[in-house]
Amino acid sequence: MISQQNGNIFTVLLAAVALVAGLSYYAYNTVSGPLRTEANLQNLEETRTRTKIALKAVTLEIPNQLDDCDDDGFKEARKWEPSGAGGPSGGGLLPTDIGVRTTDAFGTPLGYCVWDTGSAIGDLACGGSGGRLAGSDTPLTEQSDSGIFLAVISAGADKAFTTTCSGYSDSATPVMTATGDDIVSKYTYAQASAFWDTTDTAPEPEPPSAAGKTVFVTNASVLGNFGGLSTADALCQQEADAAGLTGTYKAWLSSSTQSPTSRMTKSLDGYVLPDGTLIANDWGDLTDGTIQNPINRFADGTLYGADSVWTGTQADGSNIGNDPLWYCEDWTNQYADDSTGFGATNYTNAYWTEESAMYCDITARFYCFEQ
């Protein structure tokens, strides 16, 4: 009798264990499943951001790296690094010393394809053959995917590259095809060239307009741990003084507790570049979502190309929130784990101050405003 009871108890216990296991499995699949999906979506978005930042970083370094090293009228980008069996077909991996993250959010190294455009291909002055594909002789006239000059590629969640890069053949044939879940950020030569310095052909600056506060972008470019608002203001003042500009200057910059709206004098007389070019008619015009012309001149009036600018500031002059982590811990860290809002010197829409987010381990400039 006792043996039978023990057997019944053992059977009940097994049934209870099975029931708990079934409920646990159900809970795992109904709760953990959506959580895994959400994490995957976050990784995808983070990866898209990383490919865009890496593409901009490798583009911005071109004038200071190789420039037009083969003298054919078109600049060259750095070669890809050999990938073994792990990169996109026909290409390689992103150079690891460009100053930004070179892996995606899934832990896979970012792929990289680059084309050598112009009449001189594989010139020894540019490092010889290999590491670049043959591009068009006339890249500025190429449209869409026949004129791709640079591409940064993530293998996606499956960690397997399915992108193929190939040499230029004609204006109707794409030089790159992407399938599967690969994530690609790319520039044509025309798009990339918008980021480069144009100072060689810049006219001599004229004296500032009698009406309007002077605005410029700094020559200096710094990491996100530059020290805070007062440090940025001091850099603006230093460059203004060196250029012979009078007045007091502050950086168009926010923190978790301050913003241009709260810490700047709001001019009723307008804002102009050092050469007199109009930026805005007054504070209201400055903060209405657009400006009249890009802020793309240094304090001495030198015209500059496109580059990133630390702002943490929305188009209306307010900050982007009250969390220090949104400002590289109020501009005290240079870690790639944090990011903040930035603008770009080639825009007149809201992107002049709030183009996107950028990691704190990247260098960027400041906009400086006379008070």
Image (spheres, helix red, strand yellow):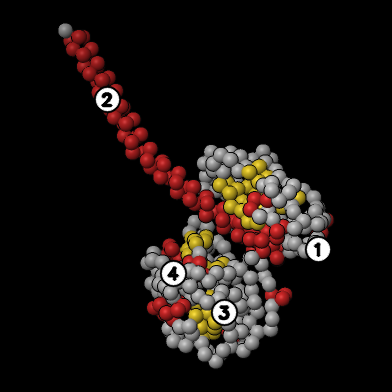
Q: Nearer the viewer, mark 3 or mark 2?
A: 3
Q: Which mark is residue 71?
A: 1
From the image, state whether disc 1 or disc 2 is nearer to you. Answer: 1
Is 201 on the left-hand or right-hand side of 122?
left
Q: Earlier in the sequence, mark 1 or mark 3?
A: 1
Which label is found at residue 314? Answer: 4
Say which label, 1 or 4, has the lower sequence index: 1
Q: Is residue 93 above or below residue 210?
A: above
Q: Mark 4 and mark 3: span between their CA atoms?
A: 18 Å
Q: In the drawing, what numbered circle is on residue 167?
A: none
Q: Which residue is mark 2?
A: 19
Q: Give the residue drawn at x 52%, y 44%.
A: 106
Which amino acid is tagged 1?
Asp
Label 3, secondary structure: give it.
strand
Q: Position of residue 225 (x, y in %)?
A: 52, 67
User: Which amino acid is tagged 4?
Assistant: Gln
Find out whether the residues at labels 3 and 2 contact each other: C-beta distance under 8 Å: no
Which sits earlier in the primary sequence, circle 1 or circle 2?
2
Residue at numbered disc 3: 216
Q: Residue at x 21, y 13 (%)?
A: 8
Q: Amino acid at mark 3?
A: Phe
Where disc 2 sits, the SS reads helix
The residue sitting at 38% across, 66% down in the picture is 321
Instruction: Pick the residue in front: 264 or 194.
Output: 194
Label 1, label 3: how far apart the Cα atoms are:
32 Å
- Please give left or right for residue 124 compared with residue 294 in the image: right
Relative side of 101 to 201, left or right: left
**Label 4 packing within 10 angstroms: few (<14), some (14-19), many (20+):** many
Residue sticking out furthest to the top: 1
